[in-house]
Image: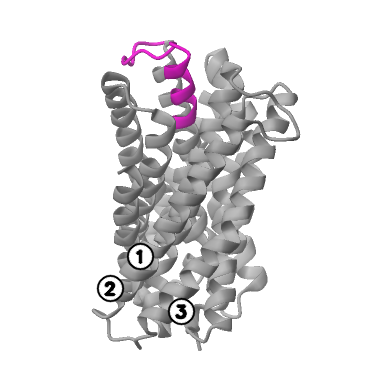
Amino acid sequence: MALALSTCAGFVAGLVLGSITGTLEKLPGLLVLIPAAVGMRGTIFGAMGARLGTGVAAGLFEPTLRRGTLLSNNVVVGILSALLTSFYLAALAKLVASAFGEEPVISFWDLVTISVIGGVLASSITLIVTIGIAVLSFQRGWDLDAVSTPMVTAIGDMVTLPALFLASLFVANDTVSGVTAGICTAATVAALLAAFRAVAAVRRILLEMLAVVALAPLLDIVAGALLQAHGGELRAVPAVLILIPPFISQAGALGGILSSRLSSKLQLGVITSRGRPEIPALVDGVIVCVLGVAVFTAIGAVSWALSRLTDGPDPGAAALIGATMLAGAIVLPITLVVGYYLAVLTSRFGIDPDNQGVPFITSLLDLAGVAAILLVMRTSGVLP
């Protein structure tokens, strides 16, 4: 059910992306930012859901925001991470878009305005949803590891694109953009100071996530650069633009489910950090594969149906569904191998796998998903 709802939410993001091609043309460089900004919601709040899932399984979760509780500490981490990473993504997008783009890119301060304002708006909604899912799962006895990641990832995808579009309206006026960028910079500095002064539990999570949050967006930025490089082809076939957000969202959701379940099992002693997966880990892998086949088939079918509502060319149901399934067949093995061994390696080094697994695997699958889609769609003739 969670994957079905998150897939629907992913298509909302796809329809938004397919409908803002005019904005993408007016603001060169924005397309580079989009995958990273979208992926960062899953990175921050997917990891938050994984930590809360482990807390529920270990009996440490309390449905209260009282200072010092597991939930309260994670809320603080989410807020600080959202501000800091949004500014960081603007800098990365500017560097990559300027280095690899064939046309002038909007200014760094315009990207700061769009990234921070859009990121804060999207993060606020995603944070509320993450808290709600955690509390509801705790009260209803649901498996939070299976529910949180797909729902949080999809909600992040669904709200981030409209939030970035709304934030892009601020850059229509140079004065407004400059003032807003200054406010965003001041808020980022305040968040950095707050991170240093935070309680020990919050600082530990932020420190453990620092490397992966710094490096993982590079994968999303590269994914954005790939999209920017093929922007003309993608705009010519809206069906593929509609397809991309739900595809990479669900690839990341499947990876997040696997990573969250393995992390909980490792910390509870159900499995050990062995090179050869044990039976419970293999069962999780099989579940992810079965879900993947169903989800990617549905994404191809719904994308074709929605593409009929656009003015673009009809790539054909068989071609689009078949290409989507083939792209899914490429990313699923990556999901299984990286998801398992990342959890094992972090556990062996004494690092909380909840802080590493979901953030890294969702970003990796963003890049792998975009690359697989572009490869398959071009070789199959769906893209010109």
**Label 2: how many residues lie within 10 Å, few (<14), some (14-19) or many (20+)?**
some
Q: Are marks 3 and 2 in contact (CB under 8 Å)?
A: no
Q: CA distance from mark 3 to mark 1?
A: 12 Å
* Residue drawn at the location 28% of the way across and 86% of the way down: 311
Picture coordinates of residue 263 (x, y %)? 57, 28
Callout 1 environment at 10 Å: few (<14), some (14 to 19), or many (20+)? many
Q: Is residue 65 left or right of residue 334?
A: left
Where disc 1 sits, the SS reads helix
In the image, what residue type sits under mark 3?
A: Leu
- Read off the residue under disc 3: 234
Please state which amino acid type lies under the numbered disc 1. Gly
Residue at figure coordinates x 60%, y 38% from the top left? 282
Residue 40, placed above or below residue 173: above
On the image, numbered disc 2 is attached to which residue?
A: 306
Numbered badge on residue 14: 1
Left or right: 220 as drawn, with respect to 311: right
Q: CA distance from mark 1 to mark 2?
A: 10 Å
Does the residue at mark 1 contact the one at mark 2 (Cβ under 8 Å)?
yes
Indicate the position of residue 97 as horizontal and vertical percent values: 59, 68
Q: Which residues are magenta?
A: 49-67
Sequence-wise, which precedes: disc 3 or disc 1?
A: 1
Q: Is residue 83 above or below residue 159?
A: above
Cα–Cα span, label 3 and label 2: 15 Å
Under circle 3, the secondary element is helix
Please check the rendered image and state whether residue 55 is part of the magenta-colored stretch, yes or no. yes
Q: Secondary structure at mark 2?
A: helix
